[in-house]
Image (cartoon, rainbow, N blue to C red):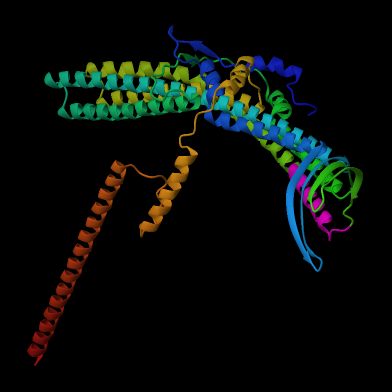
Amino acid sequence: MKKWCRKPWSLLLAGAFLYSVSSVGAAADLSLAGAVELALSQNADLKITKQAEESALASLGEAKSEKGFSVSASGGYSVGRNWNDRGNTTSSGLQASVKSGINIWDGGKASGGIDSAKIAILTARLKTARAEEKLRLSVIEAYYNALQAKKTVGVNKASVDNYQAHLTNVEQLFSAGSKARMDVLRASVELSDARQTLIKSENDYEISLAKLRNLVNMDRDEPLRLTDDAVYSPFAPALSDCLAFGAENRKELWIDSYDVARKELDIEVVKAGYTPQIDFSLSASANKDFEPTSSDSRGVTAGINMNWNIFDGGRKKARIEAAEAALDAARLQLEKDRNDVDYDIRAAYFSMKEAENRLNSTQDAVDKAKEDYFIAREKYRAGEGIMLDVIDAQLALSKAEMNHISAQYDFARGKAQVENAMGQSLTESEQRAADAMDAVPLARAEISRKDAVHAYEENEKAMKERQDRTVIPFPASEAAAAKQSAVQKERAAGAKVSNTMNTANAANATNAADTDSAANAAAAAAGNGGRA
């Protein structure tokens, strides 16, 4: 890796990694591309990640200040009184001074810190870029998950309709006297089970939409209709090409490489701290005395100072050893991440190919399952088949359709996962959306500093008043406090009833034990009397 950029040949591969979608509705609510761009422009987690860049920029400014001029000023007014054998004297006066300085030589300590801060900025930007890529993958997966859940609902609805039609047919045949009551009951049970499955799938669909809304950071209650669908298109690049691309473009590897460079700089900075430090200083001062005599004085001083820490008891050696150990750890991390990137690409690639093979075989299974269900249903209507044949055919049809849907979206997600594992950068439109996030104003804090301090004071007061030491994060409203008090009273009453019942149970157990003991004694006495 020589520089952080995509290689020219990567542009040729990029065309193979574009998402294959086709519009299924005229009035589009949210397309796949639109969902990705919305998330890149307003996702809350991404906003947090980007703040690290601002922190790194500020650190660079701090590092540069080490090589700049420093200016300080001081002044004051003093009054004094002295007592001696000759009498008392009073003195007073004004003093003012200005001092400036600059480092001439520090062994490269300041310049090393500046270079380290520059690398930190690049690292922060790389982390943001990787976070954007991961967010894009999360949105794509959420979008396809929602589409898969929607199609699953459709399959389950069709299954309910089939079972309903079958139940109607069985009831008609039962009324005609050609089928037994048991067939009606069995058909009714299967219909109920199918409805349960449909209800669960509808809930899964709503949850998948909620997750997509959360990633996109849109109105959580806004009705959402997805307008794109995954369309199969073969994945052309070979595994070797994907591995080579990932080795050059995964942001984690670049981050690790720059981290190694920073650790090397840290060693240089530590060593530079123990070389002679030479500074140039210039100062000007002015004094005015009022008592005992009035006088003025001014002066200018310039000088070069050298400071050299010759012996520090082994501190330098220990700091260098610690920095070298950190450098070794950074190099090991780079090697580990290279292996992890290789594994990520291979695992994603093999999973994608497995889904592709399933997809190519499931459509034929769906067609055959539909034909089998039609035959079983018609044979049953004609009185030549049995109930079990219809149920088995319906189950086989639902399973075949589910397998096809699963393979379709596993392959679509798999292509996006391979692309992410390779470190494919954002497209131009996606990058524009991500850059637009800087113009989005930050949300106002939900609680002000004053309210936070007040909450702390109320919390401290409650901690002192309550014996159970329960922590209350924020002052509760009167309604909430009343509700909490009612709950506590109810718990206390319940505990009192429980204690009363425990006491009664203990008394009953004691009485029962006494009764059993008396009965056993009487029986023993009777036995002894009989033997006598």
- Does 404 sit left or right of 347 as displayed? left
In the displayed image of the protein, which residue is found farthest to the top?
26
Residue 448 locus on image (x, y percent): 47, 37
The residue at 25%/24% (across/down) is: 386
- Does 31 sit left or right of 315 as displayed? left
Q: How many marks?
A: 0
**482, 122: nearer the viewer:** 482
- Does 399 sit left or right of 413 as displayed? left
What stretch of residues is rendered in magenta? 311-330
Q: Is residue 208 magenta?
A: no
For the C terminus, which image quadrant? bottom left
Residue 116 in view (yes/no): no
**138, 287: nearer the viewer:** 287
Residue 64 locus on image (x, y percent): 78, 35
Residue 45 locus on image (x, y percent): 55, 31
- Does 250 sit left or right of 415 as displayed? right
* Image: 108 above or below 183: below
Main secondary structure type of the part rendered in magenta: helix
Q: Is residue 323 magenta?
A: yes
Q: Quadrant of residue 297?
A: top right
The residue at 20%/67% (across/down) is: 503
The residue at 20%/59% (across/down) is: 497
Q: In which quarter of the image is residue 267?
A: top right
**295, 59: nearer the viewer:** 295
In the displayed image of the protein, which residue is found farthest to the bottom?
532
For the N terminus, which image quadrant? top right
Residue 194 locus on image (x, y percent): 30, 27
Residue 265 in view (yes/no): yes
